[in-house]
Image (tube, helix red, strand yellow):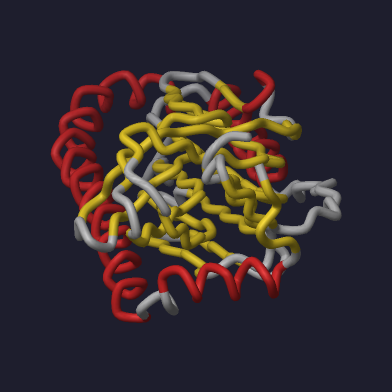
Amino acid sequence: MTLLAYGAKKVSALETALGGKPPKKAADQALAALKQQMREQFDRRNAQLAKMRPLMERSQAPLLELVKADKAAAASLAKRRSLTLARGKEKLQVKHERLKIDPRMVSGSGFWLKTPPYNLPFTWTAGDAKASSDINAGVYGLSMTGNGSSAEASAGLGVWFWSTEDNPQQRIAALFDYAYSWLDSSDWYTAHNDGSTNIWVRGIEENAWVLQQGGLFPSWSDGTGWQEDHGSNGDGSEADGRETLEGFFPARAHSLYLAFIFSKGSCDDSNGGWFGFSFAQQKQSMSVPFVMFGSL
């Protein structure tokens, strides 16, 4: 095996020489397709919530009338709500350290190593949510609160890949640093909290997704009801660490692919109206020191 290119400028020049400059139209179409799927998922989820929430509220109304009449119970509920909202204001402490790694391409193995700056930022939000993506630093983040309804966000990084050969099992892997916290809490009303890490790859010649790998760590799917409290680490405290993400997709020779390393999250809760409440919130801060295609 021979090292054909080393360093950001030389690797970029080699890619351009092999496959030309990635077309902006193709990048725009891939981003639009990704955002459309996020929107469709959010709309389906909202439609289901809108159908079920009125039925749940009517069924629990008699019980809430009894609880409301107890002054001690009402005082405890107010105190609990104050403490829950205070926990939701805690800031995420991010400890990602930038690794000093240079991109490279090795012949004989089809191995490409990509490092920041990456090629495309990706963000999408709905409801009370925020998302950011920094391709130069190789980091992205998202945060949201149900805020009496539902919210959803996605954020990530896009990386171009030029396939030099036919490979039915083209490998993509990424080093992934994460920090996150999530919390859902209920007093008679339900709350839900979901998060996942994903690798999706769009084939430009195929004009289709050739990989939609979801459920990579960190991922969670949780809900609360009655008087439950759930969260990251069991209590809503911060979790952080490092993982290796991996997926495989069919690649054509002399073809261009756009890979997205991204995270998404969703929350829903209820202000409770006249009595009771629920709360759901999450924060994610992620870093991708490098992305590799192939194996040495």
Task: Identify which residue is drawn at 60% across, 71% down.
Answer: 12
Looking at the picture, how far across and down is residue 118, in whole percent? 60, 65
Q: How many numbered marks, from 0 up? A: 0
Q: Quadrant of the N terminus?
A: top right
Quadrant housing residue 192 = top left
Quadrant housing residue 255 = bottom left
Looking at the picture, how far across and down is residue 55, in whole percent? 16, 31
Q: Is residue 137 above or below residue 285?
A: below
Q: Quadrant of the C terminus?
A: top right
Q: Is residue 252 shown left or right of residue 270?
A: left
Q: Is residue 98 visible?
A: no
Looking at the picture, how far across and down is residue 127, in whole percent? 39, 60
Quadrant housing residue 175 = top right
48 or 20: nearer the eye?
20
Task: Identify which residue is drawn at 50% across, 46% down.
Answer: 263
2 or 294: nearer the eye?
2
271 or 52: nearer the eye?
52
Q: Is residue 156 above or below residue 54?
A: below
Looking at the picture, how far across and down is residue 20, in whole percent? 42, 77
275 or 98: nearer the eye?
98
Q: Is residue 290 above or below residue 138?
A: above
Q: Is residue 77 shown left or right of residue 48?
A: right
Task: Identify which residue is drawn at 72% across, 65% down.
Answer: 137
Q: Is residue 63 shown left or right of residue 159?
A: left
Q: Is residue 8 visible?
A: yes
Q: Is residue 133 above or below residue 80?
A: below
